[in-house]
Image (cartoon, rainbow, N blue to C red):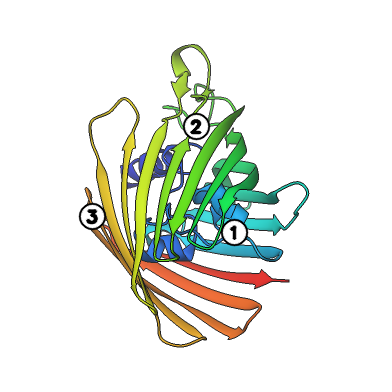
Amino acid sequence: MKKILLLLLAFNIILSQVTTDQVFTTSRSLSMAGSLVSNPSYTESIFFNPAGLALADSHGFLIGESDHYSLEFINFSYASFVYQSKELGNLGFGVQQFGTQGKRENDNGDYEDIYLSSEIALSFAQGFSLLNDRNSSLHLGYTLNGFILKQASSAGTLGDGTNGLGKKDLYNFGIDVGLLASLRNKMQVGVFIKNINSPSMGRGSTLQYLPRKLVMGISYMPLEKLNTHFNLETLLGYKDIHFSFGFEYRINHMFVLNSGIMIKPNRFGFGFSYSPIKEVVISFGTLTHPVLPVSNSLEVGFKF
């Protein structure tokens, strides 16, 4: 029974992650409970608001891995690359991989790792500046996501696979759009719509439309070293609204502290960024859960 519950949990988690939307892709988003739509760094923009790509002042690369709920059979990794281009608008490329794995006994009586399911999102994004002057700016962006869901065959009720589900691969694509505006370098407003084309996965009785999500947020900098963020998000067609709050405090040119709170469900995040040199940033984030253990993320970013 314990193994069955773990498998059900893993399957439920994977259906709520990359394909439908991974809210806490990066360490910074994890530590601030996802409140990034109005102030993503440009290497994070492909995941949270592609309009932020327009702010890139150099090429950039980001790679990281998350330990979701401290569960060893779940793995999540991500990477992004930003190419600065005045002619084409800044371009972003991203990949996210979320998987569940288990163990099985081989003919020698030893246990070996096997994958149960794997979910991959390959992304291309572009960001443009529509207005950019001394007092205000307005940016627009879009992301094209290719979804790949790989599901291993199941053992079935007999346990030997004879009446289980067969191996299956599913594919589709989604479109995201984002808007980002700023006023006097003190306030930023962001809007992001996920899966605006309402993509689906599966066929027939297994057909499932991926949720379309609207995220809106405001960032305000009351002090030179302090930035605050407020997000609200909702699934289009549903009444529930989720709120998150985050803040960042820059101690000096090397250290930044992050923290955040999410409501419905109630979660608390904390993290930091360390920049040993101007071109490199190492970030860590952790986020609690009302039932499951904490989630952790570690990443490294480069500018060049």
- In the image, residue 166 sits, relative to residue 289, either above or below, namely above
Quarter holding the N terminus is: top left
Looking at this view, is 296 or 198 the one in front?
Answer: 198
Q: Going by the image, does 158 lie left or right of 4?
A: right
Residue 118: quadrant of the picture = top right
Q: Does residue 231 appear anywhere in the picture?
A: yes
Q: How far is mark 2 from mark 1, CA to CA?
A: 23 Å
Q: Quickly name the residue at label 2.
A: 195
Q: Residue at x 60, y 42 (%)?
A: 120
Q: Is residue 68 above or below residue 236?
A: below
Residue farthest toward the right in the current orientation of the protein: 87
Between disc 2 and disc 1, the foreground one is 1
Mark 2 Cα shell of 10 Å, populated few (<14), some (14-19), many (≥20): many
Farthest residue, direction top:
204
Question: Percent from the top left, x then y, of residue 296?
Answer: 42, 66
Provide the residue designation for mark 1: 55
Q: CA distance from mark 3 to mark 1?
A: 38 Å
Residue tagged by mark 3? Answer: 291
| Amino acid found under the numbered disc labelled 3 | Val
Q: In which quarter of the view is residue 219 placed?
A: bottom left
Residue 70 at x, y = what percent? 39, 62
In the foreground, 140 or 78 = 140
Number of marks: 3
